[in-house]
Image (cartoon, rainbow, N blue to C red):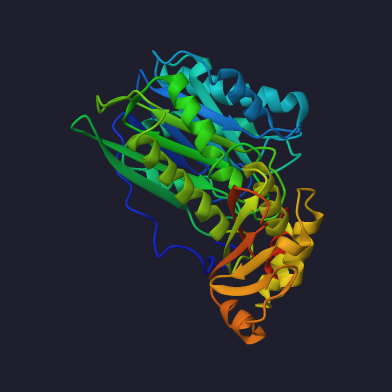
Amino acid sequence: MGKYPVSPLAPAAFPALPVIEGVAFATIAAGVRYAGRTDVMLARLAPGTTIAGVFTRSSTRAAPVLDCQAKIGGDSDAGAAIIVNSGNANAFTGRSGIDATRAVTRAVAAELGLPETRVFSSSTGVIGEKLPAGRITDKVHDLSAALDPGKIAEAAQAIMTTDTFPKGASAQVELGGKTVQIAGFAKGSGMIEPDMGTMLVYIFTDAKVARPLLQQMVSELSDRSFNCITVDSDTSTSDTLLVAATGTSGAAVTSTEGPFRDALHSVMLDLAHQVVRDGEGATKFVEIEVTGATSDQEARIHGKSIANSPLVKTAIAGEDPNWGRVVMAIGKSGAEADRDLITIRFGEVLVAEKGWVADSYREADGANYMKGQNLKIAVDLGLGSGSATVWTCDLTHQYITINADYRS
């Protein structure tokens, strides 16, 4: 929220996101943790909106996550709302966390004339401190009065914690002669290795999509986007991804395959990459491609092992082409590998093959490649047809600085 310099990997500006008919946003400074910060976001959704979601599988997940999980399969005839606060995660807060979540969702339901079962909430910030729900409920009327379809950028700003920039993405697709819009935003910078979807992500579309079909797409696509990123190997207690389809365009999606799925995937992948680009202290964006595994699942295990290795990540930060650390990460992953079949490339530079450094490899070539901001490490295991791509960032001293004083 401005305490640290903007990531060098940040986009030039927040994108111009389209208005999604049937969605309105409002934000306010409620003083949840810090004075003078915009820290609460409210989204109101039109009647008939279908909502799908995926959530952290952490065994210590927060009260708002449990509440969303209980509500996600509900009826869409009524309208709906999403309310999010930053500054306090309302996680590991026992019975008080449940009570605080209910107080907030009930206040929103009463203000907007909605069933409480159609109000979804999220909280992000410090774990283990009681959420001062009254500071949020006291502002619900003001939030309702300020609802505006054009305030999606402000909504993205309000949910940030250690993020150095707000994250937004959009796509447009033609369905049956009608134009469909998709727009969304995310927050996330540290405590990032999603085990479902991601940190906090909210995506909206004016397409008409039945809830079971939307849920299937969201679950499948999160596994190919947010579940393929990592900053620091730590899975959040609060990870939540909600996708809302208002149906106001009149364009119906009738299949889990096709242009709408592709467009939704592009938005989800864009947001996932932006989270990595804002990884705490990050200076390098790294794509890790693993091929030749015995299965896609085995390939992802190897990819995550490389991406989460502190030794690999610090070597990248220091622009050191230490390919031996990649070999180490493959060997420790627990997935199948044969030392004498492994090929490693840094970008187009062939580094190692057949269990040894490549004859053509020159250390200067590897070192020169590592100076870039956007890097690719490619590993072929030579065992089968399984493949996976994961994305991560480097590990710098700034990560320690940010997390050492996070609660202060």
Instruction: Please determine whether, in this image, residue 122 is positioned above or below residue 352.
Output: above
Q: Residue 192 in the image: x percent, y percent?
A: 65, 49
Q: In this view, does 77 lie above or below 26?
A: above
Write down the quadrant of residue 173 in the picture.
top left
Query: Residue visible at 50% across and 37% down?
Result: 221
Q: In which quarter of the image is the C terminus?
A: bottom right
Does residue 18 show up? yes
Viewed as shown, does residue 22 lie left or right of 314?
A: left
Q: Nearest the camera: 59 or 384?
A: 384
Which quadrant is home to the N terminus? bottom right
At a point 56% along the width and 44% down the height, the residue shown is 226
Residue 23 in which image quadrant:
top left
**Between residues 156 and 189, which one lies in front from this camera angle?**
189
Q: Is 63 on the left-hand or right-hand side of 153?
A: right
Q: Say if residue 38 shows up in the picture.
A: no
Is 166 on the left-hand or right-hand side of 223?
Answer: left
Q: In this view, does 323 lie above or below 40?
A: below
- In the displayed structure, would residue 315 be above or below residue 94? below
